[in-house]
Image: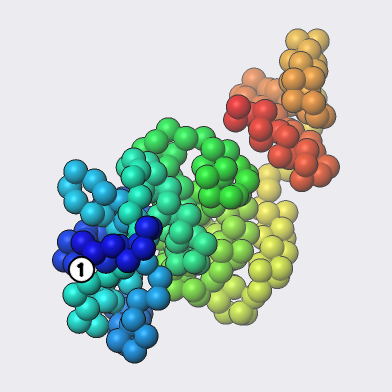
Amino acid sequence: MEIIDKDIVDIEIDSLQPNPLQPRGQIAPDTLVELAESIREHGVLEPLLVAKTPAGFQIIAGERRWRASKLAGLTRLPIVVRETSPQGMLEMAIVENVQRVDLNALERAQAYKRLLDEFTLTATEVGQRVGKSGPYISNTLRLLELPDALKDGLISNTITEGHAKALLGLEDINLMLQAYKQILHENLGVRSTEELVRRMKASSEIKPKTPREYEHTEDVAKVENDIANSLGIKTKLLKSQRGGRLLLIFKTDEELDNIYKRLTT
């Protein structure tokens, strides 16, 4: 290992290992070929970010450059070494990839889920680490609930993340697929998709029960009032013998964000 400056060192390419926590999925071979050609001509312009672990030097950020450099025939690479934990490796890999727009929406969602599941973080804590709000993280995670056909469309860029998030508003898988087909047939943009979803929801919703079917006792009113005071917003509790609905009523994004924080902290 040769020191280039106080932060950057030069290391044999075969000494590096891919990050086992890499949030990226498959790397398209054609993009590696293009990058390898660029590296042959200009070299590696930015050092790879690497962690020194008991298993060896593992790449935190720059796996595409590493693989492309192998294709280009390089034997050594410039790296910057960081002392970090497995959680730190995953966090840095996610942040670096998100900043470079290297991850598609589903890969981002899967990476956020790993931070939630493997490191027991909340959506708000994940957001703080990647520079996003808690609600943004939660909405992105919902992409993992999409049916496979829509996931495929998202990965292939047939639809955008905006289309996918709008379709999630339908909740019913059959309605999602029906709307997806209409998007493809009519080449709908995100705004048109949002309007389509609103129309489909309005036409599919079951008519609410008449007030007489709901219990509105003093106990129900007290619970409704206590919830409203706790959350600091207007609420509506509709209770019947078969269950009921709790409506949280907000007027602004700020009020929604406050509700989210109260429910998740």
Tag 1: residue type?
Ile
In the rendered image, which residue does mark 1 sit on? 13
Location of residue 182 in the rendering, given as x and y in whole percent from the top left corner = 59, 73
Q: Position of residue 28 (x, y in %)?
A: 33, 75
Q: Vertically, is 81 above or below 115?
A: below
Q: Is residue 118 above or below residue 65?
A: above
Residue 240 vs residue 72, the one in the foreground: 72
Q: Which residue is at a point 27% across and 70% down the rendered structure image? A: 77
Question: Image quadrant of residue 195?
Answer: bottom right
Q: Going 58% across and 50% down the picture, which residue do you hit?
A: 131
In the image, residue 29 lies at what x, y percent? 29, 78
Specify the quadrant that holds the C terminus: top right
Taking 203 as reference, is 243 left or right?
Answer: left
- Residue depicted at 70% across the width and 70% down the height: 192
| Residue 50: quarter of image | bottom left
Would you place residue 16 above or below residue 228 in this image?
A: below
Residue 129 sits above or below residue 232 on the image: below
Q: Taking 144 as reference, is 131 left or right?
A: right
Foreground residue among 260 and 125: 125
Side of 176 relative to 233 (left or right): left
Viewport quadrant of the N terminus: bottom left
Residue 142 in view here: no
Q: Is residue 58 visible?
A: yes
